[in-house]
Amino acid sequence: MAGKSKNQIKFVVSPKIDIGSTKKYCRFKKMGFKYVDYKDPDFLMRFLNEQGKILPRRITGNSLKWQRRVSQSIKRARQIGLLPYVADNLK
């Protein structure tokens, strides 16, 4: 390493760059929701992926309390036919 300057140093593994440093938050707590309406399928579609599966907390950022309420509302909307159980291209 005697002949190499700092410009020529190559990393075997790329250096860690913290891109996703934004803190996740529960949108229900922040906006002061009182309940999740199971009769509003457009709102509940935000918490489903393309196949119709419920998105987990680590992706949505919901707190445990509100994630349970959202999942219960989605299940009720599916039961009365407002949301599909399975879909090919939901969004």
Image (spheres, helix red, strand yellow):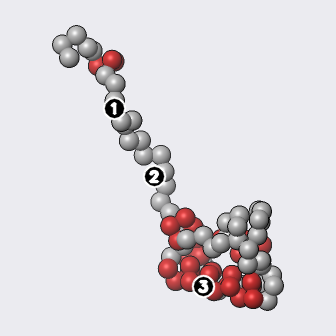
Inspect the image, locate mark 2, and give the three-letter code of the amino acid beneath it. Ser
The image's mark for residue 83 is none
| Lateral position of residue 6 relative to residue 34, left or right | left
- Who's the residue at 67% across and 66% down the image? 49
How many marks the image carries: the answer is 3
Give the amino acid type for the residue marked by disc 3 in the picture.
Arg
Q: CA distance from mark 1 to mark 3?
A: 46 Å
Q: Earlier in the sequence, mark 1 or mark 3?
A: 1
SS at badge 1: loop
**Horizontal side of residue 43 vs 55, given as left or right:** right
Q: Quadrant of residue 73?
A: bottom right
Instruction: Look at mark 1 in the image and give the residue it sits on.
Output: 12
Examine the image and state in which quarter residue 86 appears: bottom right
Question: Which of pointers 2 and 1 indicates the residue nearer the eye?
Answer: 1
Please tell me which of labels 2 and 3 falls first in the chain. 2
Whether 1 is drawn above or below 53: the answer is: above
Which residue is at a point 74% across and 84% down the rendered structure image?
A: 78
Give me the disc on residue 21: 2
Please give left or right for residue 17 compared with residue 58 in the image: left
Q: Give the x, y percent position of residue 5.
A: 27, 15
Residues under labels 2 and 1: Cα distance? 24 Å
The outermost residue toward the right is: 81
Q: Nearer the viewer, mark 2 or mark 3?
A: 3
Query: Hey, what amino acid is under mark 1?
Result: Val
Percent coordinates x, y for residue 61 in the rendering: 53, 68
Disc 1: CA contacts within 10 A as few (<14), some (14-19) or many (>=20)? few
Answer with mark 2 or mark 1, whichever residue precedes in sequence. 1
Q: Residues within 10 Å of mark 2 (few under 14, many from 20)?
A: few
**Label 3: which residue?**
69
